Amino acid sequence: MKKLLVSGFLLLSLLPLAACSNHSSPSSSANSAAQAKTFVTGAIPDQDPEKLQRLYGKLSSYLEQELGVAVSYQPVTDYTAAVTAFKVGDLDMVWFGGLTGVQARLQVPGAEALSQRDIDARFHSVLIANKNSALKPMRDAQELTNLKGRTFTFGSESSTSGRLMPQYFLQQAGVTLTDFKGQAGFSKNHDATIELVTAGTYDAGALNEQVWQKRLMEGKIDQSRVEVIWRSPEYYDYHWVINPSVKQRFGEDFPQKVQAALMKLDPTVPEQKEILELFGAEKFIATKNENYAQIEQVGREIGKIK
């Protein structure tokens, strides 16, 4: 009899817990459904985080209006994290550099290079030097040998414009990483490269030409202390890459809708003009995976793609 009473008491005690469990389930399911219906974007952290947050916050608002779905921007810590988040599906679309875009697409079958700025089809890197280094502007690539024995910094180790292509052009001129004084630096982003070379921490460095030009226009570069000494040949660089998983959640034609929305950005509309200006572009154009064949080849040559 005592056993029956104890069993009955335990059963009654568990009923409220079961009710609570059943009550929380719909809410949890609703949150999961909402998350599944959010189009999550990201970007390689190639500039100051505050600048990126402002840019992609405005772009998210624009895409929400154009696509009719919830859009959010998710920042990442570094270039590798952007590739990983895209691979595991945490990010649906990412603003990659040429190299990280190739790395991401190779790990996600069906991923598409969707759109790029008008300037990305003919992109350039620049090498800058502290004026106290006595390094002078170079007219010919063969003069890059003047960097031997100097301290030098790249941007992020996975940056196309701040590392991959500058290293490739240096190697073409006969300058290897072991030719620099000490170890080559990796500053993490283009703004940091400018700061380090301006301060004289390094004699010279490599970065994205568009960021350099933008900081000049903003008056944020001390031209009495740092200058451009070389401009690279052109190459394909930044682009949006979209994950094929979005087709299951938003429809088979969703990538085309996103591409159309990006290409629709109009400099005559004030809000859209601001987005384009933050990107440093006049417009977005279509692109395709094949455009980055050179980037993949160079990436394999220097060991960044295996």
Image (tube, rainbow, N blue to C red):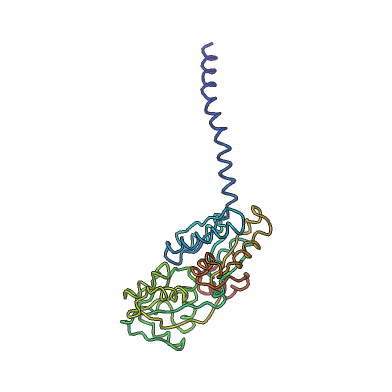
Q: Which residue is farthest top? A: 1
Q: Is residue 134 above or below residue 217?
A: below
Taking the image as drawn, is residue 82 in sight? no
Asked whether residue 290 is in view, the answer is yes
Which residue does the image show at 49% across and 82% down from the upper left?
172
Question: Which quarter of the rendered picture does the N terminus lie within?
Answer: top right
Q: Residue 278 appears at what percent x and percent y?
A: 48, 68
Foreground residue among 304 and 47: 47
Pick the residue in front: 96 or 222.
222
Judge whether 152 appears above or below 156 on screen: below
Q: Position of residue 104 (x, y in %)?
A: 56, 63
Residue 271 lies, in percent from the top left, at: 52, 64
Q: Residue at x 45, y 89 (%)?
A: 139
Q: Nearer the viewer, residue 86 or 277?
A: 277
Does residue 116 appear left or right of residue 201 in this picture?
right
Percent position (x, y) of residue 23?
Answer: 56, 33
**The C terminus, quarter of image:** bottom right
Task: Give the quadrant of residue 201.
Answer: bottom left
**In the figure, is residue 42 to the left or right of 131?**
right
